[in-house]
Amino acid sequence: MSFKISNRVSQIKSSAIIAVNMKATELRAQGHDIISLDFGEPDFATPAHIKQAAIDAIWAGETKYPPVDGTVRLKNAIVRKLHIENQLEFDSRQIIVSNGAKQSLFNLLVALLNPGDEVILPAPYWVSYPDMVKLADGQAVILNATDGIDFKITPKQLESSLTDQTRLLILNSPCNPTGKVYNTEEYRALAEVLFDHPKVMIACDDIYEHIYWGEKPFQTLLNACPELVERTVIINGVSKAYAMTGWRIGYAAGPQDLITAMRKVQGQCTSGASSISQAAAATALEGSQDCVAAMRVEYQRRYEYLLNALNQIDGVECLDCEGAFYVFPSFKAIIERMPNIRDDIELAEWMLEHAAVAMVPGTAFGAPGHLRLSFATSMENLHTCINRISEALA
């Protein structure tokens, strides 16, 4: 039987992260001792009180279809969270709960974009952004934020990229893959450009908000620039902070008319997120945050080790960062001196074969010459990986 895949799907790529993970899984099944630093998934278990909340919800009969945009309890918990932790004022009509932050962002793109509308993506970017824009019939405009400018776009870059077709700017801070965080002054400088372009909306992907160890309190764009509240959508969720990746709960907060449009999109594809997961997520947001703080301390400990260890390898240069659970070192000098390796993609494959360490090539994030390493794994694994990488390169 022959059939044709849609043009929309034909133009997008499979996730590079999933491809690396599948190859690592295949090698592991063949008996190879592969350590994976590719997946962005906490290695911690979901805290016990959150798991208990899900069990309680099941026994309480919370097993029916939930509202498309989220349960009353969870939406109110999100409103309180945004008020207390972020000093942002939303009401429940401005909140939508989705099957992960990824769906919240996809809902936004589908609700906002018309064919040909442009979305500005600072690179390095999360691997799914460009293809999600394509699926929504938009055009991705890539701004290269190199390590020379600390992996953060400048106001001059932003100004030069804006056109009559620009509809959205996506900012991810802390960033996947670089771990870089925009500060108040940097947000304000970008906002000065955006003030002159009132048709441009902004999506703030804050999913790594709680995995942050900077000296100053975490800030999202609206803390620095409250004037942009009618043009900004906050994307967040419980996956990273509470080690709840499999529970699939994300959310968005933004202008009510746009959230209503996003609810229409969700209502015609997935409907509401799991009622049991929503009960657990509400408990996560309402309860003690000590578990979040404990995980953050451990992430920072691993980060400090990995940063120092990588920079001691000849030919590797790794910038410091303030959040997320990734480092994004440059291997350009190593690629240049390896005659059979042309780029970071081939280097990642070589590392998988010769060092038995799975890492994601920087090309997938719009930054060739780099590799992304996740430290959401044990310190023992990190020590082993550094030894393997060093020995293989030597």
Image: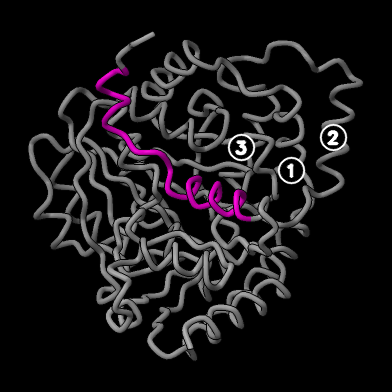
Q: Is residue 226 above or below residue 174?
A: above
- N-term mark: 3 or 1: 3
Is 239 or 89 nearer to us in this picture? 239
**Which x, y percent locates residue 361?**
40, 61
Spot occupied by residue 46 in the image (x, y as percentages of width and height): 77, 47
- Between 383 and 202, the residue placed more toward the observer is 383
Q: Is residue 305 visible?
A: no
3D distance between C-alphas at marks 2 and 3: 17 Å
Decide if residue 299 is on the left or right side of residue 262. Answer: right
Q: Which residue is mark 3?
A: 78
Which badge, 2 or 3, is on the more N-terminal residue?
2
Q: What's the distance in space between the residues labelled 3 and 1, CA to CA? A: 10 Å
The relative height of residue 28 versus residue 238 in the rendered view (above or below) is below
Q: Nearer the viewer, mark 3 or mark 1?
A: 1
- Residue drawn at the location 61% of the way across and 37% of the way down: 78
Q: Nearer the viewer, mark 2 or mark 3?
A: 2
Question: Which residue bears the numbered disc 1?
Answer: 284
Q: What whole-number distance in Å separates the C-alpha atoms at marks 1 and 2?
A: 9 Å
State the residue position of label 2. 53
Dividing the picture into quarters, in which one does residue 144 lie? bottom left
Examine the image and state in which quarter residue 81 appears: top right
Name the residue: 38% across, 64% down: 182
